[in-house]
Amino acid sequence: MTDHLFERQDPHNIVMDVTPEIASAWLSGCNTHNRKLVDAHVERLANEMRAGRWKLTHQGIAFSSNRVLLDGQHRLWAVLIS
């Protein structure tokens, strides 16, 4: 589905819409080394998304060169529940 995103090995940025299907795939296949999920934080983010207040910022979803999710698990869970 999004394998082409991982073809480059150098640091790079891509702006894209992350669907619940993409979020689910990344969480199930790449989320192996993150801190404990904080449900209240996920709900706050999801509420912002539901209300249409979610904005593009410097905080994104980050992966290592070997497809390990490094940053963004709370944002991805919020996509799923929003």
Image (spheres, grey):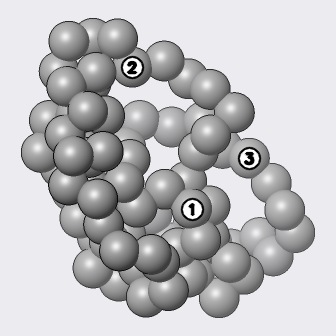
Three-letter amino acid code at the position of disc 1: Asp
Q: Between label 3 and label 2, give the one nearer the viewer.
A: 2
Foreground tag (1 vs 3) = 1
Q: Secondary structure at mark 1?
A: strand
As shown in the figure, which amino acid type bears the numbered disc 2? Trp
Quadrant of the image occupied by residue 58: top right
| Among numbered discs 3 and 2, the one appearing first in the sequence | 3
The answer to whether residue 5 is seen in the rendering is: no
- Reading the image, the residue beneath label 2 is 54
Q: Residue at x 56, y 23 (%)?
A: 56
Which residue, given by chain and number where applicable, does mark 3 sit on? 13
Can residue 59 be seen in this snapshot?
A: yes
Q: CA distance from mark 1 to mark 3?
A: 14 Å
Q: Using the image as rendered, state which of residue 33 and residue 8 is in the foreground.
A: 33
Q: Secondary structure at mark 2?
A: loop
Q: Real-space Cα distance between discs 1 and 2? A: 17 Å
How far separated are the C-alphas under marks 3 and 2? 19 Å
Q: Label 2 near label 3: C-beta < 8 Å? A: no
Q: Position of residue 24 (x, y in %)?
A: 23, 64
Estimate the x, y position of residue 16 in percent, counting from the top left. 51, 37
